[in-house]
Image: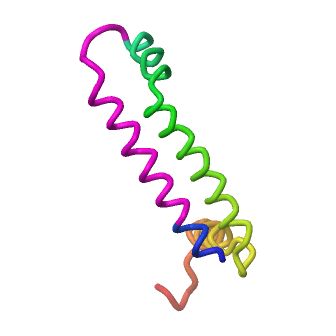
Amino acid sequence: MDIVLALVAALLFALGTVLQQRAGLEEPAGGSSSGLLLRMAKRPVWLAGIVADAFGFVAQAAALASTRSGGVALWTVRGAELRSSRPASPSSR
C-alpha cells in the first residue's frame, strides 16, 4: 500500500506542477510580483494545481506513515550522519 500511495503522491505533484505552469503561461507578463500572485490566486486552474499539491503532500505523508519498516528512510539518513561524524577505525586507514 505504501508504494501505491507514493505513486499517487508523485502523480499529484506532477499534476499540480502542470496546472500551475499552464495558468502561468496564460498570464501576460508585466506588473508587480505581488499583483501577479493575486491574479494567479483568482485563476481556477492555478488553484487546482495548489489543491493537487496539497493532496500530494497528504498522500506522501500517508505513504511514509504506512511503510513496513517504520520510517527506514529517516533512520538511514540519521545513520549516515552518525557514520560521517565518527572517527575512522584503524582497519579503514
Q: Is residue 38 above or below residue 89?
A: above
Question: Which of the 4 image quarters holds residue 46?
Answer: top left
Q: Is residue 89 left or right of residue 24?
A: right
Q: Is residue 60 above or below residue 21?
A: below
* Residue 30 point in image, percent of width and height: 26, 11
Q: For the view shown, which residue lies furthest in the left direction?
A: 29
Q: Is residue 26 magenta?
A: yes
Q: For the view shown, which residue lies furthest in the front direction?
A: 44
Please provide the residue range marked out in magenta.
8-32
Q: Main secondary structure of the magenta part?
A: helix
Q: Which is more toward the observer, 69 or 48?
A: 48
Q: Is residue 39 above or below residue 60?
A: above
- The colour style of the image is rainbow
Q: Is residue 60 left or right of residue 21?
A: right
**Residue at 45 percent of width and 19 percent of height:** 37
Q: How many marks?
A: 0
Q: Which is more toward the observer, 39 or 62?
A: 39
Q: Which is more toward the observer, 18 or 73?
A: 18
**Residue at 72 percent of width and 81 percent of height:** 68
* Residue 59 point in image, percent of width and height: 63, 59
Q: Is residue 35 magenta?
A: no
